[in-house]
Amino acid sequence: MTTTSAGTVIRPARAHTAAAGAAPRRRQGFQHGGWFIAPFLALFALFVVWPLLRGVHLSLTDANISGDGARFVGLDNYREALDDPLVWDSLGHSAWFTLLVVPCITVLAFLLAMLAHHIERGKWLWRLCFFLPFLLPSTVAANLWQWLFNPGTGMINHVFGLDTPWLTDKSYAMLAIVLATLWWTVGFSFLLYLAALQGIPAHLYEAAKLDGAGAWQRAVHITLPMLRHITGLVVALQVLASLQVFDQAVVMQDFLPGPEGSTRTFVQYTLEQGFTSYRVGYASAVSIIFFVIIAAVALARMWLLRNREEGGR
């Protein structure tokens, strides 16, 4: 770089050349990098975007399971779904299941993680026992608990001296499915909490001990605040998963909607309309409504998380 007598700064020509060539290189790099994500984009379009668009199209028709003679009906399926009491009943069952499962599984996973993190002897065995049920297929876990809740041969009533018709009484059917779900799925949230606990710096606890803080104070003022992000993640994942409950509810009730329809979930009702009543167009409309609900829950979680992060700055 040189300076004239008038004080004007003259930049070297090669600086202009480098700046001019930077944009083409970025575009070229993006073009090359695009080939790496192309397989994912193709699969995403094939298995997510196309089925969603196809479902929206079918929801506007009276298509049956054969796919022949579909007639455009506009928003009639959506109007019928919003006036269908079974739609609201099944949505209420899914929401009730979610309200029962999410707080219980969050607290239970945290307590199990705390136990496995602080226990000294047999730590690997405790971790294995807590996580192992999650590795079971959903049908295996559901069949196991169906046998445990059997009033004649099951262990639950015999061990605790009960005579409760768990799966045949609408007052207990949903509770039985909740208990089975807690045992089966708590391992995943337990693993998330355990990994987060191991990431908390030990010097925080040591400094708190020197200041005279007890175990309860350390848990309230160090552990819980350090785990608030993982708790938000656990709650969000469990809410989304619980709203879509299907496997254990269907298998434990032998593919029936439960006593007086008390365990019929939203996903189950959608499949009943599509594959039992053969009303594919109506089932598509119901599934689109459910998709909107799930998307709204996910977006609400993202909005709350962003506001919390901005408020903490």
Image (cartoon, rainbow, N blue to C red):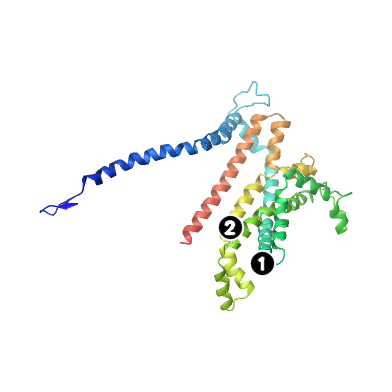
Name the quadrant containing residue 121: bottom right
- Secondary element under disc 1, as helix, strand or loop, is helix
- Secondary element under disc 2, as helix, strand or loop, is helix
- Residue placed furthest toward the top: 69
Nearest the viewer among 269 and 83 is 269
Left or right? Give the position of 276 relative to 22. right
Residue plotted at (64% across, 72% down): 216
Name the quadrant containing residue 27: top left
Residue at image mark 2: 230
Residue at image mark 1: 118
Residue plotted at (60% across, 32% down): 55
Left or right? Give the position of 195 relative to 169. left
Name the N-terminal-most of marks 1 and 2. Answer: 1
Q: Position of residue 243 (x, y in %)?
A: 65, 46
Q: Is the residue 210 above or below the residue 178 in the image? A: below
Q: Position of residue 265 (x, y in %)?
A: 70, 43
Q: Position of residue 28 (x, y in %)?
A: 38, 38
Of the two numbered discs 1 and 2 in the rendering, the one whose residue sits closer to the viewer:
1
Left or right? Give the position of 256 relative to 31. right
Nearest the viewer among 63 and 229 is 229
Count how many numbered circles sit on residues in the image. 2
Rendered-image quadrant of the C terminus = bottom left
Nearest the viewer among 6 and 308 is 6
Task: Let me know if residue 170 appears in the view.
Answer: no
Q: Position of residue 269 (x, y in %)?
A: 70, 38
Amino acid type assigned to the residue bearing label 2 in the image: Ile
